Image (tube, rainbow, N blue to C red):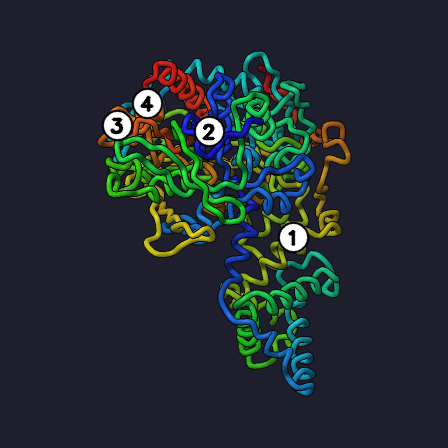
Amino acid sequence: MAEFDLTDDSVVVVIGSGAGGGTLSNELAQRGIKVVCLEAGKRLKPNDIVNDEAVMSERLTWFDRRKGTGIANAQFPVWTCKTVGGTTMHWTASCPRMQAHEFRAKSTYGMIDNTNLVDWPLEPLEIAPYYERAEYKMGVTGTHGIERLPGNNNYKVLEAGARALGYQQIDTNNVAINSRPRDGRPSCLQLGFCTSGCVVQAKWSTLYTEIRSAEATKYFELRPESMAVRINHTGQGRVNSVDYRDASGQIHTQKARLVCVAGNAVETTRLLLNSHSPEFPNGLANSSDQVGRNYMRHFALPIIGLMPGPVNMHRGTHQAGIIKDERHHDPNRGFSGGFLFLTVPFTPEIIGKIVLRDKWGDELAQIMSRYDHMAAMLVHGEDLPQATNRITLHPSEKDENGLPVPLIHYQDHPNTQRMKNYARDKGVAIYRALGAHQVFAPEDVFPATHNMGVARIGRNPADSVCNPWGQTHDVANLFISDGSLLPTVGCENPTLTIVALILRQADYIDQLLKKGVL
Amino acid sequence: MERRQFIVHLSRLVLAVSAAHWSIYANSSSDKKQKISSENQQIVAVLSELAYLLLPLQPADSDVYRKVAAKLMMQMATQPGVDHVLRNGIKTLNQYSGVPWLSMRRIERNQAVSELIDIPFMAMVRWTTHELVLRNRQVWSQLGYQGSAIEHGGYLERGFNDIGWLPKQSGVADNGGI
């Protein structure tokens, strides 16, 4: 791994090492562009990854203080990671592409009150080749001739119930998990601990893939436990350095030719807003007042069925099971956009503490005693951008690092509520069709894991933060490189789309640097 | 998802309020210490029984419920605000029907818990109960959760797809195909 001096102003500083930051770092380093990657979290060693969700939650989770209002959990509104690899350490590796109509949400859905709906500033055909590249890079099953994973018990229940209802678009999903050894990593052992980092590294995480590849070049330096706190500028509309806090609390300043922010929606917003100055009084790149607005998240509706026979849902890959029949747009269902059903297992602890948190005593004990008969899924659907769903900074409260506490405000749009109700009925029916004794489908029990939309791309600087490549309208050498870019989010897990956008962004940055424009 | 990760955080936050009485007790006279010791035994008894009623997966005298009480007692001593929440909660429980909660019949104890289930004290005890009971290996075995799989090579050769009771139907395949 290379080492660059703090005064080296020829480096690109990438903030964050997850799906966006890790991928961008590697793409630039492979092109011979010098990169310093600042990551707030620690770097886990292989032995730190274990098959224990409780232990791994302590090692992966971003615990610094945040506050939620609206229906966002007041104390823990979003769930993200603070570790090298970011949320790719915890993600389920589910990689469905967004559908063509979802890139044209405004044109497809029409005017919907109280939304900031837009069409993407790029055509689905423009992103298609980058989806191809992302899928190949990540080894997504069901693409490029890569065999899908076999179906586990939880999948078989989902599939059988879905077919009983007449659904047909059911398979073991496109997942960035090796079904055969690939890229120097082994194939999936059906361990059942995808969200605990994947001890065998069959799952694509930037810690095991992009970071490793970047470090094999002479052009990449990773600085873990380096929390970016402020981006500085020259006074002539260009950024020129990043202040970051190391593990001991000491502040350093890294000079930069270019800065790319990939901190996940909450931290990206906080960093931009916290970097205000007389020239940028509302925060960096925020002349539109759109930074932090249009915050979107997919609702995550868990459904658990107590089935007539054993399922042992904990055995196997988490989201290698999907039903796509409801993901299209059909206003006759009473809402715009669509949703997905995906398998997911829950541990006994998660069920007791979170999913069935309204139950206790003999009732809960009787349910828990049927754990081996449980099948479970997660349903998530398209969220619509609303200006009032917004991330801001607390005016006075500081967190553990002395930074303003992020405030996350979120309310369901009526469209979302109608979709949830419809989706819940369908999900419950899937398990009922197989004779489930009981089905549970509690609402809003999880913090948001897909956090998107707060620095969206667009052509008009008045209503978007970035141009179609993620370059901010206000500051030419400042890029946003994570899910904050998404102007609308479809119903699909966002990581594949983020990686595709970042591959496109890397090409663009490379071209601009070669032209000497940046 | 997710999911479990916010559990740990929530528990920390639930516990964050004020005061640490333990250091005061440490400087008390021996009579006072004895009184406190007896009082603490009462608290342990109430917390153990409450943990059992909240999640009766093991016999009432199981170690796992005593461990819940022990953990809460430790938190009383070390985390601001916990002492206040727990003592007030037990007081509320005892006041519910005018007699000590532990002296009531199980059905009456359950009734009291049911009436008070939404107070912060209950949230605190439930959280710790779920954490310790549902992380307990013996309980896992009882429920059929198998825990860490890596040392056994995962479930690829150990029943990840062994379901046998689903109705036969056309179109069901093990594999979604490419």
- Residue at mark 2: chain: A
Residue topped by disc 3: A110
Residue topped by disc 2: A20
Amino acid at pointer 4: Pro
Label 2 sits on a secondary structure element that is: helix
Q: Quadrant of the N terminus of chain A?
A: top right
Amino acid at pointer 2: Gly
Q: Are marks 3 and 2 on the same chain?
A: yes
Q: Are marks 4 and 3 on the same chain?
A: yes
Mark 3 and 2 residues: CB-CB less than 8 Å, in contact? no
Quote the CA–CA distance across marks 3 and 2: 31 Å
- Mark 4 and mark 3 lie on one chain; the one further toward the N terminus is 3
Q: Give coordinates of residue B71: x percent, y percent.
A: 65, 63
Q: Residues within 10 Å of mark 2 (few under 14, many from 20)?
A: many
Label 4 sits on a secondary structure element that is: loop
- Relative to A59, say whether B59 is above or below: below
Amino acid at pointer 3: Gly
- Relative to A259, say whether A77 is above or below: below
Quadrant of residue B155 within the rendered picture: top right
Q: Residues within 10 Å of mark 3 (few under 14, many from 20)?
A: few
- Relative to A167, say whether B104 is above or below: below
Q: Give coordinates of residue B137: x percent, y percent.
A: 74, 50
Taking depth in this image into account, of A163 and A316 the one nearest to the observer is A316
Residue topped by disc 1: A366
* Residue ID at (52%, 71%): B19
- Mark 4 and mark 2 lie on one chain; the one further toward the N terminus is 2
The reply to whether residue A166 is in sight is no
Amino acid at pointer 1: Gln
Taking depth in this image into account, of A457 and A417 the one nearest to the observer is A457
Q: Are marks 3 and 1 on the same chain?
A: yes
Residue topped by disc 4: A468
Quote the CA–CA distance across marks 4 and 2: 16 Å
